[in-house]
Image (tube, rainbow, N blue to C red):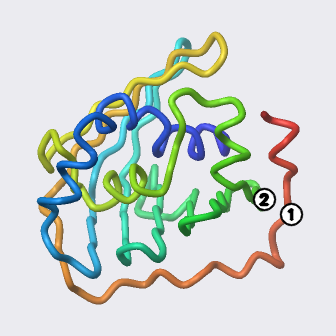
Amino acid sequence: MLLAVLVLVGCGAKKSIGKSQASKAESAPAWHTCLIQGAVATITTNTDRFSASVTMQAVRDSMLVISVMPMLGMEMIRLEATPTELIAIDKLHGRYAKATFADLNRQLTPNLNWDILQQICSADLPTGNDKARLLYAFGNETIELVINYPPRKIDVPVRVTNQPLKKYTEVDISKWL
């Protein structure tokens, strides 16, 4: 599940977003912070389907925090991202993994990058800002991520501080990739 969060949050976005990324950047609304609460993300693979409420917080060009809350509003998985690094924290199992975009892109096609992840986390998509549907293949697995966005709030206070990691066990991401 931890790898799925790293992979699914942005990997397939290039397919849907990549071609119009440059034109979108030119016409993007000026925002410094963005908060999306109560988005619903559904991940479908060859064998499983998983839905969860998601909160996304962004500070433009600085940091993103994605909180996955599958039940009762309790954060089970947290993804923290900067322009160079991703940290996925599995709070349920007490573990975390770190990766750079280069680490992930050794196995992912199309490549994941900061700009695509930032577009997803701010609902600043060329296809509109109410729904995203992303497809991705990882080995023999087909992965579909659908995000239904509620209205976003821009230029509001957000909490994007790093989660202290000392109480979690680090997992070597290279063993998964």
Q: Position of residue 44 (x, y in %)?
A: 44, 24
Q: Position of residue 120 (x, y in %)?
A: 33, 51
Q: Compare residues 122 and 20 and report the one nearer the observer.
A: 20
What is the distance, in whole Å, between disc 1 and disc 2 at their CAs? 4 Å
Q: Quadrant of the C terminus?
A: top right
Residue shown at the point (35%, 74%) measured from the top left: 60
Task: Indicate left or right for 2 with 145 as reference.
Answer: right
Question: Is 8 on the left-hand or right-hand side of 94?
Answer: left
The amino acid pointed to by label 1 is Thr
Q: Residues within 10 Å of mark 1 (few under 14, many from 20)?
A: some
Q: Say which residue label 2 marks.
A: 95
Outermost residue, bottom side: 157
Instruction: Please report the residue visible at 27 percent of the width from the left and 46 percent of the height from the top.
Output: 21
Q: Position of residue 91 (x, y in %)?
A: 67, 62
As drawn, 72 above or below 4: below
The reply to whether discs 1 and 2 touch (Cβ–Cβ < 8 Å) is yes
